[in-house]
Amino acid sequence: MTKTSEQPWSREEFEERLRDQGKAYHIYHPFNVMLNTGEASVAQIRGWVANRFSYQVAIPIKDAAVMSNCTDRIIRREWIKRMLDHDGFEDLNGQSDEGGIEAWIRLGLAVGLSREEITDLRHVTPGVRFAVESYVNFARTRPWQESVCASLTELFAPAIHKQRLATWPEHYPWIDSEGLQYFRNRVTQARRDVEHGLVITLDYFKTRQQQERALEILNFKLDVLWQMNDAMATRYGLPNRPPAEDRPANADPETDAKQAAAKPETTRAQHA
């Protein structure tokens, strides 16, 4: 007989527990709070845009990995939309979309970066690079259902995009409004993506053990996003913390680690 503590959560409770993880979303990270409350300098905004680009270009690679592991063609037909959202497309009828990667480059141009310095990733810190590569590697090596679950940070994404759209024009009027188109696009796209990914997760993770594993996976992805912000805070500073010494961003990962260890740790638990 199954013990009460081992019984699976109902579908409704399982979804509620997944959504509850949003308390640890990087919308609460001090670096993101700084950006959205108008306290960021031009250099900090440019640093954030340049570093996040490494994540943007990794998203369709991650999604291709999910598809390569997925044997369900119905799932693949829906999942490929995520790749097209970021890579863009041009169909036989002449319809086209430049995609999220190009939209992000336009954001970079709007904040004063050149196309070359965005796309060659010269500003990406070791911590951000490591976090992004960890996420892509997860998608390549884990069952595709687990990768779908990891994508459920999209549950919380519309709020962060809306926040940027609401606050950036007021705080940073020097940024051309057209540069914010990526955020406008993702408000709708994220809702569509999460509806699909949530159904898959609720259907697949049925036992209590599987459901608890799903929470672990979602928290892994939340850690990835939090670590990216930690790395940028170390490199570019916070209102109460000076930036790291000026040096090539990818020169010495060991130094980055020592600097991070010497500063007060910013944990997701503090904001849960």
Image (tube, rainbow, N blue to C red):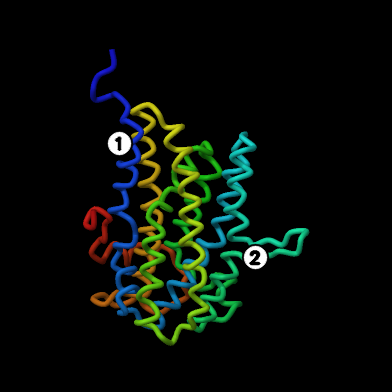
Kindly indicate the quadrant of the structure image that contains residue 267.
Answer: bottom left
Residue 214's place in the image compared with 191, above or below, is above
Furthest residue toward bottom: 174
Q: Residues within 10 Å of mark 1 (few under 14, many from 20)?
A: few
- Image quarter of residue 6: top left
Question: Along the horizontal axis of the image, is 101 left or right of 249?
Answer: right
Could you tell me which quadrant the N terminus lies in? top left
Q: From mark 1 to mark 2, how far is it between C-alphas?
A: 38 Å
> Which label's residue is closer to the chain start, 1 or 2?
1
Residue at figure coordinates x 49%, y 59% from the top left: 188
Give the image location of residue 37, x and y in percent. Answer: 30, 75
**Taking 6 as reference, is 174 above or below it?**
below
Q: Nearer the viewer, residue 199 or 207?
A: 199
Pick whichever, 204 or 11, lies toward us.
11
Question: In the orientation shown, which residue stands out farthest toward the right?
Answer: 92
In terms of secondary structure, where does tag 1 sit? helix
Residue that badge 2 annotates: 97
Query: In the displayed structure, would residue 237 be above or below residue 96?
Result: below
Element class at badge 2: strand
Q: Is residue 216 visible?
A: yes
Q: Residue at x 62, y 57 (%)?
A: 84
What kind of residue is marked 2? Asp
Q: Position of residue 241 (x, y in %)?
A: 26, 75
Label pair 1/2, CB-CB below 8 angstroms: no
Out of 235 and 202, give the one closest to the viewer: 202
- Residue named by callout 1: 13
In the figure, is residue 93 to the left or right of 182?
right
Residue at the image point whose x is 34% and y is 79% from the top: 40
* Disc 2: CA contacts within 10 A as few (<14), some (14-19) or many (>=20): some
Residue 209's disc is none
The answer to whether residue 225 is left or right of residue 121 is left
Q: Quadrant of residue 236?
A: bottom left
